[in-house]
Image (tube, coloured by chain):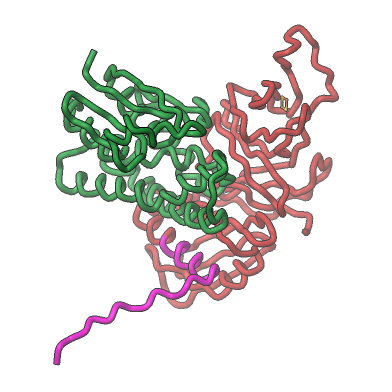
Amino acid sequence: MSGITLYDFELDENCYKVRLLLSILGLSYRKVAVNMVPGREHLGPVLMALNPRGSLPILTDGAVVLSEAEAIMTYLARAYDAGNTWLPPAPKDHGAVTMWLQFAIRDLHAAFFARRLAMFDETGDEVALSLAARRAFRLMEDHMTAREFDRAAWFVGDNPSLADLALFPAIALSRDFGIEHEAYPALRRWMRRVRTIPGFVTMPGIPDYY
Amino acid sequence: METGWYPVALAEGLERGTSTGTRLFGRELVVWRDSAGASHVWEDRCPHRGMRLSFGFVRDNHIACLYHGWQYDTAAQCRYIPAHPDLAVPGTIRVATYPSIERLGIVWAWNELDSAAPQEIELAERAAVTPVRSLYVDASAAKVFDALVLAECPPLKNAGGATQRSRTDALVSFKNGTDEILVAVQPLSDVEAALHIVIAGSPDIHGSDSQKRVSAWGEALRRDVEGTPQARELRHEVAP
Ligand code: FES
């Protein structure tokens, strides 16, 4: 048993990103279930001490304490991906993966909020969030369409990378907030490929068939 | 809404054993391809409780509803009800279907449910087509056609002279020299349309390079149609 602990909320897509990578890397870890909604346990003193931002996921590994899914994924890839494929070292691919991780944080943030609005009764501008989420999905669709012209299957390079794992949840869960997959044929094909990655796991809202 | 043949998907993009939901004039359709390679276009509604079949999945030669697992064969006939595994399913339980056909690398549907006698599709098949992409636009089909009939054909392999356009109810052809691009327009709703774009000619000639050029052309057309503000040219201040 490794010393990894994940503070996790089952229905949260950012926690799911980390669970997905941990499973794919074949790492055993201790999972601490946090009742984020409706319990708001992530804002209690214990977790606030670990992560003053008051967000999940949080990962600890020995003395290492990290929050934010993309940062945790980067850490896990560097620390435990022996094949070095999930965060490719070649400058060009490394830069591109980092760009898409940034996209997952910034451009897809609207999708994250749109889902919280729909699932957890939070407040926000539903129309604006949906528009922004669709704009982000369209950029992903255009990118994967272009990739297919080059017979490429993944967002970056010849292998699946952290980019694919970080981008997958928002679109795979988009029906939770009323965005169908009709307009994204290239992303539909890509999502089917993601499901074939050894170690792939689902979460509530993401069926294992597609 | 006129009765006729309308495009609903690019044939190549619809992989075996998969399904997708789409719309024609606001009505929900499920488009799927069975494991033998045949494509089907049905009403996206399970006869059991009306759930969308496109949320379900394809296994072998049937499509299964996500909700209670009723399974339908390629003739849209219900064959299996998990809650009653020994029941001989009555022949009356079937999904309503649209006549459909593949032509020019595109799946077409006749937009009349369970029509006994759709007209012949008038589009002549080509020796080879290169699929480009389906492009979903936030604008009506009429607005898309208005833009298409003014569009120029991007140069591919053998351009020459002016673009010649011709159109039928659902298809626009752009010819330039021996290059030809075909754009089929699917009216999704009053305010959304899909463009299914192919290049006439073999993928050996038009793979990758031409596909990228036509795809970028389509994206520019989408920007125009949706009325996104034109990107202003970057102006570099040059010190005197
Ligand atoms: S609604 Fe389809 S099986 Fe019940």
Q: Residue at x 67, y 25 (%)?
A: B67
Say if the magenta span includes residue B239.
Answer: yes
Q: Residue at x 44, y 50 (%)?
A: A141
Is residue B138 or residue A132 the one in the foreground? A132
Where does the image place residue A28, in percent across and percent down from the top left? 28, 17
User: Which quadrant would residue B93 be assigned to in this image?
Assistant: top right
The hue of chain A in the figure is green
Is residue B50 or residue A20 the one in the foreground? A20
The hue of chain B in the figure is red
Where does the image place residue B153, in percent across and percent down from the top left? 47, 69
Answer yes or no: is residue B171 visible: yes
Quarter holding the C terminus of chain B is bottom left
Q: Considering only vertical position in the picture, is A99 above or below B95?
A: below
Report the span colored magenta: B216-240
Ligand 1, image quadrant it occupies: top right
Is residue B174 or residue A121 the one in the foreground? A121
Decide if residue A67 is on the left or right side of residue B174: left
Where does the image place residue A183, in percent across and percent down from the top left? 54, 49
